[in-house]
Amino acid sequence: MEKNEATTITYDYLVVINPDAHIARDVTHYKYMIAHELGEPRQSFSPAYIPLFRSEFPGCYEEDFIGVLAYLAQLQSAFTIYTSRIDHSEVGEQKHTIFVNVANPRPVEALHSRIMNAFEVDAQHYRPQITLARGLSSPAFEKVLKQIDNKLFVRSFYCHSFLLLRKPAMGGDYEVVREFSFGMDDPHDGPLFHRAA
């Protein structure tokens, strides 16, 4: 694709925190288990991540977007993210989401808030989480509830960066545009545990 063509396309941009490989593998296991319980064929599942910000705009603004994110990342300190269990919520009428909770949401919420403020977007309700399944009907949710209800997911990982992803707004798969390492990263600080229960 020519560079000029890429700048005229509207992209769906997504800023995310990626967990480590161990957690990503465990999340994929649960995604497969849910799909199996619902009788859905095995498929390639979306990557495990905690979303921070999403917006659509033409590719010609991408460099400006990257500049703002790079500036924010330089001011950000690294932190540890802890999870404790699998949870669920009702979204809209008769639609359900199953997710891995973030047990210490404040650092992620603060980062999300800084990104929203930088782009002058009004604050919205935000709950950091790693989605396992979304848009489930009530019958489908009830079918998998016994498999995930009160299931522990005690993990932690050291968050020292976030990723910018994009895909054409008309559809397709996300691709990584850039990783932004935090400017206040202390490599000696890290999670107290990686997995338990």
Image (cartoon, helix red, strand yellow):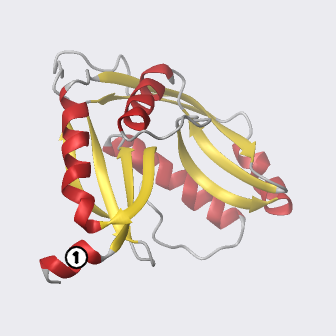
Q: Is residue 146 visible?
A: yes
The quarter of the displayed image where residue 56 is located: bottom left
Height in image: 1 above or below 48?
below
Amino acid type of the residue that numbered disc 1 sits on in the rendered structure: Ala
Percent x, y for residue 88? 71, 42
Percent x, y for residue 69? 25, 41
As rendered, which of 160 and 20 lies closer to the eye?
160
As rendered, which of 191 and 53 lies closer to the eye?
53
The quarter of the displayed image where residue 73 is located: top left
User: Which residue in the structure is indicated by mark 1?
Assistant: 6
Residue furthest to the front in view is: 120
Say which residue appears at 36% left-offset and 71% top-offset.
10
Q: In this view, does 140 lie to the left or right of 153?
A: right
Height in image: 170 above or below 106?
below
As rendered, which of 65 and 45 lies closer to the eye?
65
Disc 1: CA contacts within 10 A as few (<14), some (14-19) or many (>=20): some
Height in image: 190 above or below 151?
above
Q: What SS does tag 1 mark?
A: helix
Q: In which quarter of the image is the N terminus?
A: bottom left
Q: Is residue 158 left or right of residue 178?
A: right
